[in-house]
Image (cartoon, coloured by chain):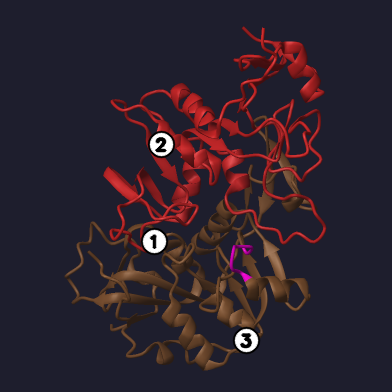
Chain colours: A red, B brown
Amino acid sequence: MSDVIQRLTRKQIAARIAADIPDGSYVNLGIGAPTEVANCLPSGITIILHTENGLLGMGPTPPPGAEDPDLINAGKQYVTANPGAAYFHHADSFAMMRGGHLDYCVLGAYQVSITGDLANWHTGAADAIPAVGGAMDLAIGAKSVFVMMDLLTKAGKSKLVSRCTSPLTGIGCVKRVYTDHAIFDITPQGTVAHDLVPGLTFEALEKLCGVPLRRGT
Amino acid sequence: MNKICHSLGEAVADVPDGASIMIGGFGDAGVPFEAIDALIAQGAKELTIISNNAGTGDQGIAALIGLGRVRKIVCSFPRQADSKAFDERYLSGELTLELVPQGNLAERIRAAGAGIGAFFTPTGYGTLLAEGKETREIGGRNYVLEYPIAADYALIKADRADPLGNLVYRKTARNFGPVMATAAACTIAQVAEVVAVGDLDPEAVVTPGIFVKRVVAVKPDHPRA
């Protein structure tokens, strides 16, 4: 038996998230790693992507030479608009979040607590120049907020924590955390770990995280 | 009624020192760069700027900041890869920042334009950005009290206008334009094209002319296909 942990790549995590998003969903993908989920959505179903700068029905990156400076996503990258797309202003765009109209939002994180608190906008460093953008609106703005992140920092510390030490983005807002080691569901009964990667035992995962976990099926 | 100004210089001529100015745009999309250039040439200083970003490189809001003309900025995302002008003056303490979550920024501007005195929003509850603010539990959810943001001027970019000030936008360049237009005492729209009264489909007008004081045609710097 091998004890080498077969961690998922970023692409594999994105594919796992994409597989869990049902046909007919309205989805916002946060900037950074979550944008990879768009490349993994299965064909033959309708998932409508929202970008908070004012577009529902966001399509893929345009071919070279077809970029339009008036058509960008929240990460300020050039995008396209799919047939059936709609443009709208910022107050309408954030009403889609705050009003509970978006089904899923996938965000990156510095830390997630076992009660679903999210920290993803500010490292907390004294000399950091703050910028928040739509992070706090997104954190509270979808029916289900998913986080996509590596379980450990580069220094090997768990980003799933009992209590966030970085400044919070939202309280109790995260429903599920997809990582390179396992998937974690934040529930009122505790944090349930499931879909552990091959080579990783529940006991080893608990030790890596240093927080109480429940064994999922 | 004719709201057309012949130049951006004419449109911004009366901006006084100390004015509060909303500037549309997200990233570079919808930023009225030429109107900002006119404001730079006009010379007003001690300005309060309300915008999503704080400018990048050496153009637009970054140029205004770099010239020391901005006293305070209200925005959601000042720090960017190339936001040197902001970074320097913020770190040196010359520039005051009010950091506002993006959706709260839009809604506070919308509230000002709609005559709403304040509103409770779930965004930011329990975070640094809600410290010291009044909160309330409504229907089992926690909310933060936020106040409107109005301004003396709004500089926005649209695609087409008629002489009555009705505006149509283009793609994601719409972003903050429609809400800012409602929340400033004097909204100045730079547009790629001015058409005759009656040439805009009333069903397609996004910003009705009542919200717009001045319109200036500015040749677009890229094709509008």
Compared with B219, A123 (above or below) is above
Tell which residue pokes out farthest to the front in this image: A2
Q: Earlier in the sequence, mark 1 or mark 3?
A: 3
Local SS, label 3: loop
Q: Quadrant of the N terminus of chain A?
A: top right
For mark 1, what is the residue? B174
Residue B24, image x, y percentages: 47, 68
State whether discs 1 and 3 lie on one chain. Answer: yes
For mark 3, what is the residue? B67
State whether discs 2 and 3 lie on one chain. Answer: no
Q: Which range is magenta? A: B78-83
Q: Are marks 1 and 3 in contact (CB under 8 Å)?
A: no
Mark 1 or mark 3, whichever is nearer to me: 3
- Chain letter for the residue marked with disc 3 in the picture: B
Residue A16 or B27: which is nearer the viewer? Answer: A16
For mark 2, what is the residue? A39
Residue A101 or A110: which is nearer the viewer? Answer: A110
